[in-house]
Image (spheres, rainbow, N blue to C red):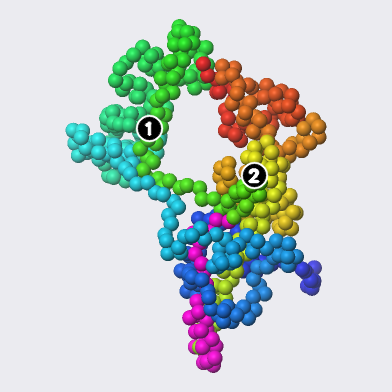
Amino acid sequence: MLRQVQSQKLLSKLSPQQIQLMKLLQLPTIALEQRIKEEMEINPALEEGVNTDEETNNDIEDENYDDAPKEDDNQRDDFTISDYMDEDEGASYKLKANNISPDEERKEIPFSVGVTFQDVLESQLGMKELTDHEYLVASYLIGTLDDDGYLRRDLASIVDDIAFSQNIETNEEELNKLLRVIQEFDPAGVGARDLQECLLIQLKRKDVQTMIVELATEVVEKQMDEFSKKHYDKISKKLEIDDELLKEVIQEILKLNPRPGNSMSDGQKSQQQVIADFSITNEDGELILTLNSRNLPDLKVSKEYVKMQEEYSKDKKKESKEASTFLKQKVEGAKWFIDALEQRSYTLLYTMNAIMEYQREYFLEGDETLLKPMILKDIAERINLDISTVSRVSNSKYVQTPFGTFLIKNFFSESLSTDSGEEVSTREVKKILTDCIATESKKKPLTDDKLKKVLNEKGYNIARRTIAKYREQLDIPVARLRKEL
């Protein structure tokens, strides 16, 4: 039987301004610059420049902004953004000017312009004596090569594709013939269908075919599986050579380029450097934290829009009321956006300062073994903010230190107990694991079981499967693949 029931529920909803703040929090510096540009385009009441009109500021502050994002008052008493600011700064959300004029255009993302390896192949194709039909088919083949310079697709599929897309009839035999022509081009190895073929092309094009090159060709052609698995004893036995000669053969193969396309493809890709969101400096044992805002423009609410809104609000006409409402929304939106930027800077510094103090020993010395176990909850409880806020601050943001630039989220790690019961960071264990592998004998690399014993002897209670997990996270191959002659 259906019936109606009336009940009360207490729900917590974020205001549009709080949602805007959350979105701004997770943006790194470069993305924030683009977001500010977008906001200035869609909101004409938001202008670039320092607001020096006190009357305009007072008029705007008299409006009701109860929905604007606010921090707990007690938190602001203990820690304020002004602690990190110079008194003669412009906008309050800017933390450092670095003596750079607002009119000066700074380009932090360099772009390199050059030809692609497909362009190089096309130019070499024009030097071959081919019919128009063959030239079109060969050009299509060049276009199907991936960034590494390989032809990953089977020829039968290419025959169908070129028929449908270019209305050109061909067959696998003709494609094979033209592919061999492309494989003669530079850089050596392009047009190969797998790694083995790529290496063979390069070896066979050596100017001088020495005994080492001939042996390397035999290894790649007949013993590629043993070579990839580093079964050097099987290779030396089949070739009937000693370890010294085998070492020269292996070095000859390792000098080859497994990705010939990459040597020419850098020109088509933008080279983006990491822009640190924070900077930590050590001044006589005192850690100084700053927020990177040097490329962020000073923002203000348009005085013209405020005056227009005041004039339209005095008019009782319907059109004037609609215009007044529209202008008021834009002015309030501009004010909210500036407030959100200020709140973002405050939250970022507040959170990063807590991380810096938590890992103070590391930021002073730069030794990863000094990193303490730290999870999001530890910082959230320390600064009395939500875990999701700490996650937004630490995710996709970098900090520049005297020891390098690092992703902030990498400072967070789980804990591990030692024999003495002390809690240590898993980063410390990974550092010791990396050092052990770096100093191991390459002729007899340490297996996961032996690495486990080494760490257990140092007092770290860790299982073999955990060693394997950490090794994979560090992109370190298994012992067999680390073996060298």
Residue 403 image point, x, y percent = 58, 41
> Which comes before the other along the chain, label 1 or label 2?
1
Q: Is residue 48 above or below residue 432?
A: below
Q: Quadrant of residue 218?
A: top left
Q: Secondary structure at mark 1?
A: loop
Tell me if residue 351 can be seen: yes
Q: Is residue 281 left or right of residue 271?
A: right
| Amino acid on which disc 1 is placed | Pro
Q: Is residue 113 above or below residue 23?
A: above
Q: Which residues are magenta?
A: 291-319
Q: Nearer the viewer, residue 174 or 474?
A: 474
Tell me if residue 414 can be seen: no
Residue 344 among magenta residues:
no
Residue 148 image point, x, y percent = 40, 35
Q: CA distance from mark 1 to mark 2?
A: 41 Å
Which residue is drawn at the image coordinates 56% and 67% (left, top)? Answer: 88
Which residue is drawn at the image coordinates 52% and 12% (left, top)? Answer: 233
Q: Is residue 75 left or right of residue 238?
A: right
Q: Nearer the viewer, mark 1 or mark 2?
A: 2
Which residue is drawn at the image coordinates 44% and 51% (left, top)? Answer: 109
Q: Nearer the viewer, residue 113 or 120?
A: 113
Q: Residues within 10 Å of mark 2 (few under 14, many from 20)?
A: many
The residue labelled by disc 1 is: 260
Q: Is residue 431 left or right of residue 244?
A: right
Q: Secondary structure at mark 2?
A: helix
The mark found on residue 363 in the picture is 2
| Amino acid on which disc 2 is placed | Phe
In the displayed orientation, state which residue is furthest to the top.
Answer: 240
